[in-house]
Amino acid sequence: MEKAFDLVVRGGTLADGSGAPTYEADVGVKDGRVAAVGKLAGAGAEEIDARGLLVTPGFVDIHTHYDGQATWDTHMQPSSWHGVTTVVMGNCGVGFAPCRPEDHDRLIRLMEGVEDIPFPVLSQGLPWNWESYPDYLDALEQRRFDIDIGSQLPHAALRVYVMGERGANREPATEADIHAMAAIARRAAEAGALGFSTSRTLNHRTSDGQPTPTLTAGEDELTGIALGLAAAGKGVLQVVSDFADPAEELAMLRRIVQRSGRPLSFSLVQSPRAPDTYPMMLDWLSQANADGLPIRAQVAGRPVGVLFGFELTMNPFSQHEAYREIRDLPLAGKVERLRDPAFRARLLAEESAAVRGFAGSQPRAWHNMFLMAEAPDYEPTSDQTVEAIAARAGRDPAEVALDHMLSHGGRGMLYLPFLNYAWHNLDPAYEMLTHPDCVPGLSDGGAHVGMICDGSFPTSNLTHWTRDRTRGPKLPLERMVKAQTRDTAETVGLLDRGLIAPGYRADLNVIDYGRLKLHAPQVAYDLPAGGRRLIQRADGYVATVVAGQVTYRDGEPTGALPGRLLRGAQAAPRAMAAE
């Protein structure tokens, strides 16, 4: 006898994505969609006992960089380990389409520099079975994934494709250039791009140090491309910027949205260089929305922080002459030398400007650096810095850092929060997360593989903000679930998901909320060419469901690959009748 449902999640406590109070109910799934919610008599071909467990919509992460990984991998980890069932890639103006064959290496160097994905990984991993952006989508459409994937047209690739060397060198676009870019943007949106992204930050450079091609693109160029989306009648805009002159740049973004009518989101964090600027930007955001402009800010629920270690891109001793002698040794060889008393003494005696860039201008930022523990603390107090620990022990901070990195066979890591943590607390993040026009984002899943490991944002948003925070106010569970399901989905036009309601996509998480926790980041060598990347696992995800199929059980993949390329925005469903 045929079962009433393909899947029933029984007796769970639903935070359904609407923001309403949790309630107990069954969820019946049929043909990849939620068919019924309530006390269901009908049986499922498969059933999950969710009594005592939290049931949420699948998380929608709108700020990732799986543009390369999606061409060679089926599992978009680490995101899919953290309850994410839909990702949007192509953010920050970087990606691999459109691209002429002669520009392959140029775009790889840009991604290597901006997103810290090594050249050999990309050069061996990317199949390059496309040139135009629609070709790229066609290539992705042939593949199967553990989650759904949406893509955006990246400005850097577009600019180089149209302008060649002039585009890479950041020369102003001519009227003909802008017309060509607008036409490609229109075709991209019509082919299924969720939108267009650009970068205006000096943090984004090629691996040989050149700024991203889009850094100084003029308002006429950005407006022209936005009008290309407008001509297609679809697509969102995504912007990351240093906001060196926030009033001027925000005014420009406002004009672009007014002229094009396309929704826009921009990255918003507390910068250590101007820690008091973000409230002004929140006020501007409120006014823009009061004036009817569809603008949102993507914000981070914890610090954006760099990890340092002997397996990673950087460590505090990277530029020491002594360390350069052992830099290319395998990890075991490095550890052996670093534990040699004579070598250790020579290393510690050297002065170096090792931790620059993200760490600021200090030779060593011990006063902002923390020891990464097995149970990560993403809101650590000032008395937990390397400097403070060393002072209490009467030791040199460099010794404390070195000993910690040598722990666990040389796999110990240091954590340097460089955004959202200027005051050594997450009060700014709380202000941003509670602003009605902000949504969680900026996880950069799939990128920064040797420096940053923030694809776990969705898990820490739940654990820290709704359960574990002790240093300030928390957020209601229902509000945080809504923020990273329905709110993020709506931001990019995916109106068919993010709610547990009849007719919506059956993307679900079944979570042991009391047991939900993050593990410390670790290194895996599973990229093409044996490339290294940071990964981070979690406990507490009992099951993750994508389009009605269980893709993960207790954090391990089931082998099901129901995820597909998303072709553009998705309309809200019509309700299905309960069977």
Image (spheres, rainbow, N blue to C red):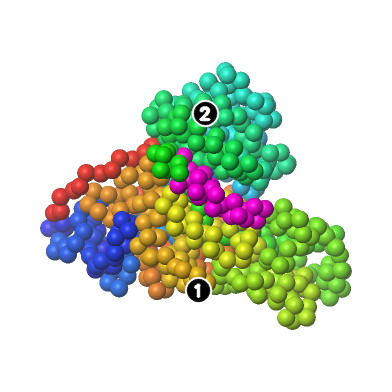
Q: Is residue 275 above or below residue 92?
A: below
Residue 186 occupies which quadrant of the picture? top left
Query: Is residue 443 shown in magenta?
Result: no
Residue 130 left/right relative to 414: left
Q: Which mark is residue 430?
A: none
Viewer can see residue 78: no
Q: Is residue 273 magenta?
A: yes
State the CA–CA distance, disc 2 to disc 1: 45 Å
> Can you identify the residue that label 1 sits on?
470
Q: Residue at x 63, y 41 (%)?
A: 245
* Residue type at the position of mark 2: Thr
Q: Position of residue 121 (x, y in %)?
A: 62, 47
How crowded is the residue under tag 2: few (<14 C-alpha within 10 Å), some, or many (20+)?
many
Q: Earlier in the sequence, mark 2 or mark 1?
A: 2
- For badge 1, the amino acid type reads Thr
Q: Position of residue 195 (x, y in %)?
A: 45, 36
How busy is the neighbourhood of tag 1: few (under 14 within 10 Å), some, or many (20 plus)? few
Q: Residue at x 31, y 56 (%)?
A: 18
Q: Which residues are magenta?
A: 264-286
Q: Position of residue 512 (x, y in %)?
A: 37, 70
At numbered mark 2, what does the secondary structure look like: helix, strand or loop?
helix
Question: Does 511 sit above or below residue 103?
Answer: below
User: Residue 64: where, in percent of width, then height?
Assistant: 51, 48
**Residue bearing mark 2:** 223
